[in-house]
Image: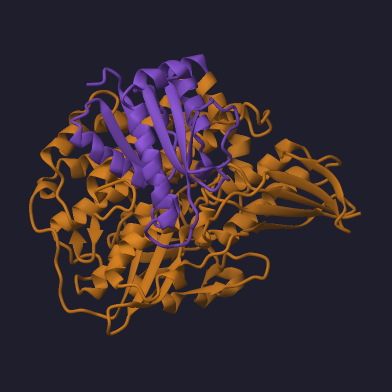
Amino acid sequence: MEQKITIEPVTRVEGHGKVTIYIDDEGNVSQSRLHIVEFRGFERFVQGRPYWEAPVLVQRLCGICPVSHHLAAAKALDVIVGAGTGEGLTPTGEKMRRLMHYGQMFQSHALHFFHLVSPDLLFGIDADPAIRNIIGVARKFPDLAVQGVMMRKFGQEIIKATAGKKIHGTGAIPGGINKHLTQEEKDSFINGPDPLNIDKMISWSEEAVNFLKSYHKENKDFIDNFAVFPSNHLSLVRKDGALDLYHGVLRAVDSEGNKILHDVDYQDYLKYINEEVRSWSYMKFPFLTEYGKKNGWYRVGPLARLNTCEFIPTPLAQKEFEEFKAYTKGKPNNMSMHMHWARLIELLHAAEMMKELLNDPDLMQGELVIKGKKQNEGVGLIEAPRGTLFHHYRINEHDQIEMANLIVSTTNNNEPMNVAVNHAARQFMTGQKKITEGMMNAVEVAIRAYDPCLSCATHALGQMPLEITLMDKEGNVIDKART
Amino acid sequence: MSVYKILIYGYGNPGRQDDGLGNAFVEKLQQWAMEQNLKNYTFDSNYQLNIEDAADVAENDLTLFIDASTEDIENFILTPVDASTQVAFTTHAASPGYIVNLCKELYQKTPATYLLHIKGYEWDFREGLTEKAKQNLNIALEAIKEKLQHPEILINNFKDF
């Protein structure tokens, strides 16, 4: 009798999704799917609105990563107002945006690791869910939990100082930025009382990387063999091949490291990327057009970025990057759990970048905005915490948005997450007579590695009940758990 | 001048009509506090609560969270926040109880914390509160201004809670 297992909603990810796993009469996983069950209508919502509103409007997509949408939209509108394609801004405009972006990256990566992932690592993926959570971490590892909270807080304060406020920030505007950093703000970030200063953030980031490396040493089998599969990897890289989270050219490599997308201008992304629709999910499945649906899908995010770039332009993160690359002998890393290692190296890089920028005098003086000959279409790309984020707008003669296309990071990772779910399900459930909570959490661990923001990928409204149902092939409920 | 440190924290999405009630409340109360020259108040606003808010709760004697409500209430309702043992399954859904619980575990403190729920009606992708929500906001605002004349009552009542 075939069994159908539903995990709904997936926990400790941003937003809501569900997983179904079918197990055949022999106990083999016959099919698994990550469904995104919320509807996305945002692209239509912005149609008809004045283009300059977009950087503020798009922040309504999600309260978790509004800064990424804010900046990607602003970058697209830079093109429309004739301010160039990411390289034409004033030094102040570009550096303030970068500080905002690295603040966002820092707080998002800290939240994900300390709040969402550390319970699995510290207690084990099959530990009692009553303790396998952030409250459990706070009780058993209070110093670690406080670090996570304060790193989030530091990043949020950087966002507030650069975007103007925490919600509906207005900092990035078409062609630049609308404020300088004040002396008071700069001083508070550099010399703030312990622990809220940039040097402490850097040292905590180093500790986080070391924590993960120690964990890896002790749990090699799990970290190196869980949900491992070959894939392509895509991200922005700086023109010289450096990791650059704010701007660059679009590069993809295959699972062996061969370049399959050769540092192209992202204004032309439609030439290279296509999206497939499948009936069982509201989230689309992007792929590289040249390689087709079957072979052209790719991963984005921290792991992909460290696979596509050649070096990291800050010293401490570069040292960690060299160790990371040496582990796979310079070849792309295709281990899903190594996403956490990559993410923490980026956390360290973001902290180093913030320090460099905070000490840059351009943030406190200089022209804020530049404009040129207006265009009617523009594309903005950014490496958001979860991966490459595409914003594309076309305007009409009345300066209204007539077309918007967004490919968010989580959508780019749709196929890899489905593959990861399948691997985890096969690894933990094949041949098992009873499906335990720990086995189901293993599936969630695979998804969580990608830090999906399902709200962004669709459009979140309300909550769904927490329910897992075990069904036979006729749809009869055999068992229920986790309500 | 109040001797107590007080945090007024509204959350919600002002781009979703009445979901912005909490944020609007904070703006109005902050204006009033400036006019009254009140000290020791901190005002904050965000899309939703998140883990770092536990640190801010720990630093204050009294915290007032303000959120929009879809529940069947009159105009508003003010309730003490119990340290919930329920763990949020996504950071989109961190509740005031979850934040207070985190504060308790991380900082060994349970300062007086209340949740002000103000009734809203419309939640579409649009800026601006509905007229009925604005009325509820003003009624709640007047009631809270009065209570904040004597924050010690809120603090002591919470201790008894």
| Residue A126 against residue A178 in the figure, above or below | above
Position of the N terminus of chain A, as image quadrant, is bottom right
Q: Quadrant location of residue B54?
A: top left
In the image, taking residue A109 as reference, residue A220 lies left or right, namely right
The residue shown at (84%, 39%) is: A434
Q: Residue at horizontal 27%, vertical 29%?
A: B41
Tally of numbered tags: 0
Q: Chain B colour?
A: purple
Most foreground residue, A375 or B85: B85
Residue A155 in view of the camera: no
* Depicted B39 relative to depicted B73: above or below: above
Q: Position of residue A313 (x, y in %)?
A: 27, 48
Q: Colour of chain A?
A: orange
Q: Position of residue A65 (x, y in %)?
A: 41, 51
Q: Nearer the viewer, residue A414 or A346?
A: A414
Direction bottom: furthest residue:
A397
**Front one among A438 and B76:** B76
Q: Position of residue B91 (x, y in %)?
A: 50, 41
Quarter of the figure with residue A326: top left
Q: Quadrant of the C terminus of chain A?
A: top right
Of A355 and A479, which appears nearest the observer?
Answer: A479
> In the displayed structure, does residue A455 sit left or right of residue A191?
right
Question: Where does residue A401 sit, x and y in percent of width and height?
Answer: 35, 76
Residue A121 seen in the current view: yes
Q: How is the image coloured?
A: by chain
Is A185 left or right of A247, judged from the image as shown?
Answer: left
